[in-house]
Amino acid sequence: MIQIEHLTKRYGAFTAVDDISFTASPGRVTGFLGPNGAGKSTAMRMMCGLTPATSGSARILGRPYGALPNPTRHVGVMLDASAQHAGRTGRETLLLSAIVTGAGGRAVDAALERVGLSSREAQRRVKDYSLGMRQRLGLANALIADPHVLILDEPANGLDPAGIRWMRGLLRDFADDGGTVLLSSHLLSEVEQVADDLVLIGRGRIVSQGTKEELLSRGGVVVDGTDRAALESALQRAGLSPVALPRGGFGAQTDPATIGRLALDEGLVITSLGASGGGLEEMFLTLTADDAREVAA
Ligand SMILES: Nc1ncnc2c1ncn2[C@@H]1O[C@H](COP(=O)(O)OP(=O)(O)OP(=O)(O)O)[C@@H](O)[C@H]1O
Ligand SMILES: [Mg+2]
């Protein structure tokens, strides 16, 4: 269990994480989603005691990370897979962690097997690892002491599609065994299949959170028309904050009837209108629209 309450981080006048609160529960995978610079890594660093919070609290298994009796034993962390010592072999890296956490040397082979690194690969130096291999090693490192909680920052980064699917399975199994998983991503597609709960963050603030099903059911609408410029300005005037979608048309947080009335009032020709439940991607873009750099710029 991870409990975040009013967690805030300010760097001078800039607020990187702004009063966020959420819970990641045991037996569930919680996806922590947001565009680049949203504050995901900063929040995760605060959870693991690597960055002091300006205010608010983050408790893991009921206590702040630093107050856990043996934190590395209970909490598996992967914040930056490229932070491994380049000159050590994968096996040496894991052996050190096994010693530090008290997991014992025998945990090394189990961890290697769990992440699909062969013993030959484990003999190679980390500097010669591919990005995907580093991610696997980072995950092995996080898993070494058989923790109850996993905190992973962008673990799918650099994994190929088969690797992403493999990781999903690993995280699913971990949660199904009663573990708590918090994983961040800036790509919804990476987490939408595995996450049970989602926390969406933009510019340091939580824009939406809930179970994946809840968020899907309030996904808003996707609408397109013959005159896109007129449609967009009508949506804006109605206060519906339209988001231009990559494949054309607009996403908006409202229901089809509202759009229908608007089209009637404004004399617009609508060519398609539907709930955006087909994918969380539109919802993600819609919810983070005010926060994404591209839209703001
Ligand atoms: N030490 C620091 N000093 C000043 N600003 C910082 C510091 N660390 C992070 N920030 C700022 O805080 C904001 C949030 O950064 P953070 O790395 O948490 O984002 P993120 O959501 O992890 O993004 P990404 O998807 O790109 O990894 C950014 O604007 C960043 O520049
Ligand atoms: Mg980050």
Image (spheres, rainbow, N blue to C red):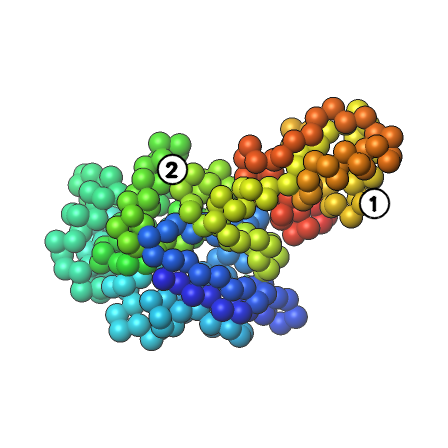
Residue 178 in which image quadrant: bottom left
Residue occupying the point 59% across, 60% down: 205
**Residue that appears at 13% across and 56% down:** 105
Please give the name of the residue rendered at 22% of the width and 65% of the height, measured from the top-left corner: 100
Instruction: Name the foreground residue: 254 vs 75.
Output: 254
Proximity of marks 1 and 2: CB atoms separated by less than 8 Å: no
Q: Residue 164 shows which numbered tag?
A: 2
Q: Residue at x 74, y 45 (%)?
A: 240
* Whole-percent x, y for residue 271 in the image: 74, 24
Q: Residue furthest left?
A: 106
Question: Eyeballing the image, is 145 above or below 90?
Answer: below
| Circle 2 Cα neighbour tier, 10 Å, few/some/many (<14 / 14–19 / ≥20) | some
Left or right, 3 with reference to 221: left
**Label 1's element?**
helix
Marking on residue 237: 1
Name the spot of residue 128 as percent of width and height, x first.
Answer: 31, 42
Q: Which callout, 1 or 2, points at the residue further toward the start of the chain? A: 2
Q: Position of residue 287 (x, y in %)?
A: 62, 47
Amino acid carrying mark 2 in the image: Ile
Instruction: For residue 91, say whether it is visible.
Output: yes
